[in-house]
Amino acid sequence: MTKRFVGPRVRLAVAALIAVWLTGEWLGPRLIASAYRQESLEVLNRVISGRDTHDLTFYLDAWTWLWRGAVAAGAILVALAWLAVVRRAKLSAALRDWVGAGPRVRPPVFVWYAAWFGALAGLSEAAHLSIRHLVEHQPRGFGWDIARLGPLASTLSFALLALVWVALLAVATRGRPAAIRLRPAVFVLAFFASYGVLQASDFRLARYAVLLLCAGLAATVARGAGGNGPRFRRLVRVSTPVLALALAAGVGTALLTHPAVAERRALAALPQARAGLPNVVLIILDTVRADALGLHGYTRATTPNLDAWADSGVVFDRAISTAPWTLTSHASMFTGRLPHEMNADFRVPLDDADRTLAEALAGHGYATAGFVANMGYASRLSGLARGFARYEDFPLALGRFLTTAWLPRWLVNDVLPLDVERWAGADTPSEFGKKFGEQVTDAFLGWVPGGDGRPFFAFLNYMDAHTPYIPPAPFDSMFVRPGMDLSPVARHPENSVEEMLGQRALYDGAIAYLDREIGRIFEDLRSRGVLDHTLVIVTSDHGEQFGEHGLIGHGDSLYWPVLHVPLVMVFPDRLPAGTRIAAAASLRDLPATVLDLLGFGLIEAFPGRSLARHWRTPPGGRASSDALAFSHVSVVPIARPWEPSFEGPMASLVVGDLHLIEDGEGGHELYDVARDRAQSTDLSERPELAARMAILRASLDSILGSPGPGSRAP
């Protein structure tokens, strides 16, 4: 009777699943593709109407997740129904035997086993991430503190779960000691351990596939442990010292590589500095566009402190970034190289082929330190830390420690949303992995003067003007008007400036917050008597787009909002106060400028030319007015089809008032940035500018050393 009842229904269910699978593989994608072209059924044409917002791949991926999930859910429901109707008695007996049989362990032993699984999982996860980083050399998504401290965090988290288990069991048994069944306990521990390792991988498995795989692995381990209790305990006992030694080695390495410890070693190896050398402070306001500052005519009072301090120094009205994103732009400011001359890219860190400004100054006895908020593309892994005796990127706090492994990260972020930064005594609240400007400023001011009286070079990177825009109070409401929509705007080809008003208000508030931090730095250095002997440079790595040309963010174009950045130099009694430079100034010239102003210009040589030529008057002549600023961006991995960089590498040139842009397909745009800052009128086809266009294109090709950026490898 059972056979007749089950057989036809099982075969029918399998046939139905196969039919659904084939429908999803063949019919579904074809219907979606035709609807994307508005050639399918009317109901589908209405559902898939966002062809200007998403490309076809977006809809196909969404369909794949939808129908595969439906198939998996249907299969699980059929299997559960079959088990419930036909195999219920046998299943219940097997489950009772599997859970209730086998050896038991005392609660302390169970906690020991949990810590053992946690150490094994943490070390496996750290080993996988480390090997992957060493192979791929990606400049983001990894930190060595994960490999060093993650295993310890994982061990403690597993032990904590075991203690909670024991506490709940004690409550259930009214405080009487109770032994714990080994098999189900090992199943739970092995499941969490295997999931922690697999989720850190890049196997691109669906979530349900990972869960099923982890369940199978956990059941296998639990069966072996339950059937061989003494052997399992002997394995744990023998391997525990080895795991403990590995955990201790990780913690010890973390202590030895602490920024303060590493700095002491580096300073001991420096040569003696020449007497009287000035200090250098390079402040980079990540993602700040020039026209958002008062000193460039902005109507909102975003930068009152910087505006006031700029009067005592030199302001460059047309400073141009070499790239519209972080790593390449920073690398140019550190090496003097142009983007296409370096290897640094979205998935490649800066190598050691070129000397950095920090290395050059350290060679002259400078104490060097970097304080970084952009942990994505300015951490140690980016290659920018080379030459710095002290480099602080990831915050060394409890919040960071609790997110170095999967289980503690899951517990903190999802199960128990806790403000662990408050527990750690942090003065400034922050998201995990994000620093606010106050933390960067405090770290720098706590370090100054550094180096036992040595001259110092400090690099400060602030991230507050980068998305998401979350300035602290009162800056979060400083420019917000009632009724203003503050939610982020989705990227699509028809974005408008009007849609971005709320985000622009938050962005301006973040800049005002940064201006307060700049004011703190200037005032503190002045009160210590350090400012008069310090060259301070304030600039940005790139700007930001708020609907101009339908674009949002940065990194995807070479238009004016992402290339035009602020550049202010203050060096009391050394620079001509109140000077403004109208000529274009490339940020790649900063290393050569710093060495020139410090008096090393004839000893050391960096690519580029000193910007001091713009205010120095040679004997019998005028200050230099020649200016040429080159920018470049390679293929952006996450670019949308409508974004300019999607088609290939781009390059641009600013000469005088003209800004030439060449895209990856060889097309050109030309704008007069003096009369058309919005770059709304393309002049590339104007007959009267044909000769000038030819000269600009020839100059661009000469810099690139090829017919055009589209033919160069990224």
Image (spheres, rainbow, N blue to C red):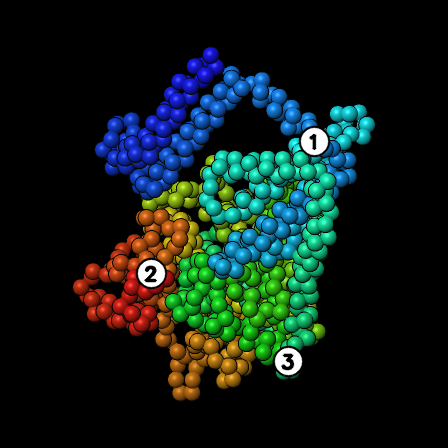
Q: Are dots 3 and 1 in contact, CB under 8 Å? A: no
The structure residue drawn at horizontal position 68% and vertical position 55%, both measured from the top left corner, is 246
Mark 2 / mark 1, whichever is N-terminal: 1
> SS for tag 2?
strand
What whole-number distance in Å separates the C-alpha atoms at marks 2 and 1?
Answer: 67 Å
Residue 446 lies, with reference to residue 104, above or below; the image says below
Nearer the viewer's eye, disc 2 or disc 1?
A: 1
How far across and down, in percent of the image, does residue 172 sit?
Answer: 75, 25
Mark 3 / mark 2, whichever is N-terminal: 3
Under mark 1, the amino acid is Gly
Determine which quarter of the picture holds residue 675.
Answer: bottom left
How far across and down, in percent of the image, does residue 643 sit?
Answer: 34, 51
Q: Residues within 10 Å of mark 2 (few under 14, many from 20)?
A: many
Total tally of numbered discs in the picture: 3
Q: Residues within 10 Å of mark 3 (few under 14, many from 20)?
A: few
**In front of the other: 538 or 148:** 148
The structure residue drawn at horizontal position 25% and vertical position 37%, both measured from the top left corner, is 37
Left or right, residue 414 beside residue 237: left
Left or right, residue 690 beside residue 702: left
**In front of the other: 530 or 43:** 43
Q: Which residue is mark 1?
A: 102
Nearer the viewer's eye, disc 3 or disc 1?
A: 1
Q: Which residue is mark 2?
A: 650
Q: Which residue is mark 3?
A: 271
Mark on residue 462? none
Under mark 3, the amino acid is Pro
Can residue 395 be seen by looking at this rendering? Answer: yes
